[in-house]
Image: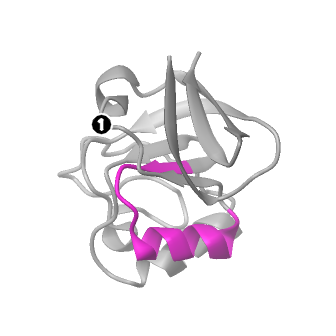
């Protein structure tokens, strides 16, 4: 199964990793611990999960512009996600991903939330300036 999205922050080659899927929005300021990479928001559907080295899929961002700096801190602390995939493009997520050089895709179809489960293995690659996310 393949999903297609808009490339926000490009990458070279293939990215293969385990998915971490939230059907909710994430505020990096408050919801994510920048030192451990763990989701600390108790109302999150991925509470206690670590985003490090995962392909993080969620609806979009919410909250403070400082979230971009939290994403950057995650990268500096080696706790950043392998890639970020969102349904809605958000300037905080975009700027944090670009500053941190994290591959990012947006405008992913709603079906991804029905088909992809946490710990499923995904492969991401680019064809003709379009992101392809393949469920393996």
Towards the viewer: 70 or 91: 91
Write down the residue under mark 1: 110
Q: Position of residue 81 (x, y in %)?
A: 58, 51
Q: Position of residue 20 (x, y in %)?
A: 45, 37
Magenta stretch: give its range. Answer: 84-101
Circle 1 packing at 10 Å, graded few (<14), some (14-19), many (20+), is few
The answer to whether residue 44 is above or below residue 89 is: above
**For the C terminus, which image quadrant?**
top right
Q: Residue furthest right?
A: 13
Towards the viewer: 24 or 75: 24
User: Who's the residue at 43% across and 43% down the image?
Assistant: 57
The answer to whether residue 93 is above or below residue 65 is: above
Q: Position of residue 48 (x, y in %)?
A: 36, 45
Quick one: SS at disc 1?
loop
User: Who's the residue at 60% across and 74% down the image?
Assistant: 72
* Residue 112 in view of the camera: yes
* Residue 53 in view of the camera: no
Towards the viewer: 77 or 70: 70
The image's colour scheme reads one colour
The answer to whether residue 100 is above or below residue 64 is: above
Q: Along the horizontal axis of the image, is 89 left or right of 13?
A: left
Quarter of image, res 103: bottom right
Q: Residue furthest left?
A: 43
Can residue 126 be found in the magenta stretch? no
Q: Position of residue 37 (x, y in %)?
A: 51, 56
User: Who's the residue at 51% across and 36% down the image?
Assistant: 4
């Amino acid at each position: 199964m393949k999903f297609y999205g808009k490339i926000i922050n490009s990458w070279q080659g293939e990215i293969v990793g385990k998915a971490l899927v939230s059907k909710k929005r994430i505020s990096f300021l408050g919801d994510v611990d920048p030192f451990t990479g763990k989701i600390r928001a108790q109302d999150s559907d991925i509470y206690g999960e670590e985003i490090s080295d995962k392909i993080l899929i969620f609806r979009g961002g919410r909250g403070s512009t400082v979230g971009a700096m939290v994403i950057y801190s995650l990268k500096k602390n080696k706790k950043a996600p392998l890639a970020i995939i969102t349904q809605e493009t958000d300037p905080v997520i975009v700027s944090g991903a670009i500053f941190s050089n994290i591959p990012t895709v947006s405008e992913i179809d709603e079906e991804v939330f029905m088909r992809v489960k946490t710990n499923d293995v995904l492969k991401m690659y680019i064809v003709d300036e379009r992101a392809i996310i393949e469920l393996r």
